[in-house]
Amino acid sequence: MLGIAAVGALGAGKAQADDLNQVLYRFEDRALTLGRYGSVSVFQRNLFVEAARCKDGPVAAYGTPDGVVGAKTRQAIVDLQSCLNSLERAAVGTHHYGAITVGLWRLLMPANMPVPDAIERANQLTFALEGTDYDVIQFNFCQSKNPRSGKRFLEGDPYCHTNDPRAYLTWGPRGATAGAGAEIQQIIFAAERANPGLLKSVFGPLTEDMHRLALGNNDAAFDILCAIWMDDKQRRDFTVRFANYGARPEVQRAYRQVYDAVNADGGKIARFFKLYEEINPVIGRDPTEIDLAFFIDRATHGSVPPGDISKLVAQMTAFATRTRNLPSPGALRKQLAAWLPSHHKYNDRLARDAIFLVDDPDVVVSDAHRRMWQQRSGLKASDFGLSDQRYIASYPVAAPTGYEKIEKFYTVLPEDKRACPSTVRRARKR
């Protein structure tokens, strides 16, 4: 049906070493939101076409290829299996009900779109928790309602209420902000340096504002973005243009580059790997795939090892050697999480940590902890094909973008850009 040549090719080269039955993604109770712009949406498009051909039905019955692996994607996989011959069925692992496996991926995808590796899938787990794609931005000015009136500032309330006064704009899957963190400025800087003229081609009349944002200091970012936010027409235009900007592959590359940099989340993840490198002689292994996913999610939202890891090394060594039996990977993660408590959104962090514990039969997750997990996501690391039986020796940390070396400036804005009300400015300083 799909061509035995496609399956026969699996026996060559690197593919021969792959477990074709290995699960990459599996929908059980909760859909996996993996992003519209990744290779999974291409996989869905191919899958839906082949499943519809097999059932002699409409492709639209499976929905749109949106990168959300849920009930319709599972149904398409099940429908497709009835048209596979015995060789194809063995290759795609039909005993994994409705799962996307290595074999099924290779059967449906072109050779230039390789199987998503553990690092990509671990990053997708955090993406699924954040729930925002590359084309989504949110202004954070006065975004909270006044408890008394039930209205926001733009809805007519005279007061500005915000739960994040130092993040003026939030963007994309890792929650990049324009404010104290300046991740948005770094991404714009990196994308424009690699693709000169990109800002002008997308933002048109707002290009000068974007240059000011990328090269300006924190005060400049506040004034520029507040002025845009206050103007309904300009805000809508900016939102549409930023969506088009975020949809560009070169911008997404810059986004990932910034977060993988040694002076950003990449450096935080490297500290976890350094910690496990130090205790490797004790536990006899590298970090597992689920360890990796835990590291990435912690680097995104939560506490990470400090620059000096000597105390943690001593604590983990003592914990690992307290009995004759080494702790399981999940038990070690649970203890490490306890040593790195989050002081921001504590319950949310507990719920996220459970994702990396529930697959380990040696870990007891309390009823209260399990309820937090179910309410927050109900996802498991194994839903993303991640395992404690496979290991990751290192993480590809990127070099700094160079943004940190440039001198940030503030210039007096034109009269039409000074529209930020005093009540908003006061909320920023609280």
Image (spheres, helix red, strand yellow):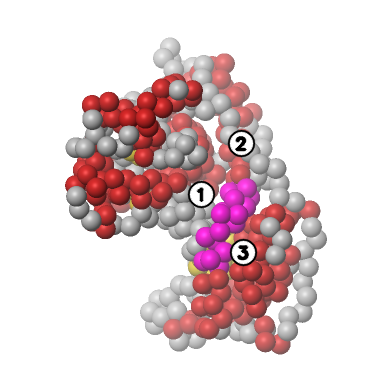
Q: Which residue is mark 1?
A: 301
Q: CA distance from mark 1 to mark 3?
A: 17 Å
Q: Residues within 10 Å of mark 2 (few under 14, many from 20)?
A: few
Q: Residue lying farthest top?
A: 324
- Stretch of the chain drawn in magenta: 242-259
- Identify residue for label 3: 178
Q: Report which quarter residue 410 is drawn in.
A: bottom right
In the rendering, which numbered label is found on residue 396?
A: 2
- Image vertical order of residue 82 relative to residue 200, above or below: above
Which mark, residue 43?
none
Question: In the rendering, at what x and y percent does residue 392 appear?
Answer: 52, 28
SS at mark 1 in the image: loop
Kind of residue sitting beneath label 2 = Pro
Q: Residue at x 41, y 27 (%)?
A: 9
State which quadrant residue 98 falls in: top left
Majority secondary structure in the magenta region: helix
In the image shown, does 102 or 213 lie closer to the viewer?
A: 102
Amino acid type assigned to the residue bearing label 3 in the image:
Ala
How many residues crowd around disc 1 within 10 Å: few (fewer than 14), some, or many (20 or more)? Answer: some
